Image: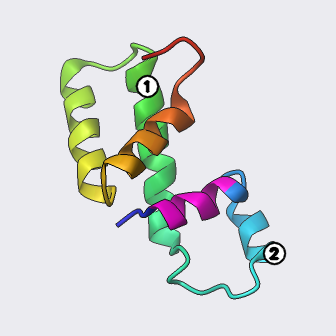
Amino acid sequence: MITLAKLKTYRESRGDSDLWSRVSKTHDPAEITSSEWSAVIQILQRLHIVFTGMAAAEFAEETFVNRRSIAEDEVVRDQLNERVMLPGMK
């Protein structure tokens, strides 16, 4: 489950897992696991495809279902959306 804290860890490392592993003092899996890191990357890539209009309807629906299943709550879902939206998109 992607929480706001886990998304913050991802953001602070600019999506660079190597950077996170070098600067994280704890390397605590509770902070974020490699599978969660991969899930964030995958959903951000899928959302980018959807929000740029390059996705088929079925792909978009699968993406939104997946986002609902991995995000802890609406705040996290909104944060994921904001990570990929370009200025002027809504």
Q: Which quadrant is home to the N terminus? A: bottom left
The local crowd at label 2, few if under 14, some if 14 to 19, many if 20 or more residues have their Cα within 10 Å, is few
Q: Is residue 18 left or right of residue 51?
A: right
57 with respect to 86 (left or right)? left
The residue drawn where x is 39% and y is 48% is 75
Residue 52 appears left or right of 27: left
**Magenta residues (range):** 4-11
Q: Closer to the N terminus: mark 1 or mark 2?
A: 2
Task: Tell me residue 44's x, y (percent).
Answer: 48, 41
Pick the quarter of the image with the C terminus: top left
| Residue 39, picture quadrant | bottom left
Type of the residue with mark 2: Arg
Question: Where does label 2 land, which residue?
Answer: 22
Identify which residue is drawn at 26% across, 38% down: 64
**Can residue 83 be seen here?**
yes
**Mark 1, secondary structure of its residue:** helix
Secondary structure character of the magenta stretch overall? helix
Circle 1 crowding by C-alpha within 10 Å: few under 14, some 14–19, many from 20: some
Which sits in the foreground, 88 or 49? 88
Question: What residue appears at the point 59 percent right and 87 percent down from the top-left corner?
Answer: 28
Amino acid type assigned to the residue bearing label 1 in the image: Ile
Task: Give the percent coordinates (x, y) of residue 6.
Answer: 52, 66
Residue, disc 1: 49
Q: Nearer the viewer, residue 7 or 47?
A: 7
Which residue is pictured at 37% across the width and 45% down the height? 77
Query: Residue 31 lies in what quarter of the image?
Result: bottom right
Distance Cα–Cα, label 1 vs label 2: 30 Å
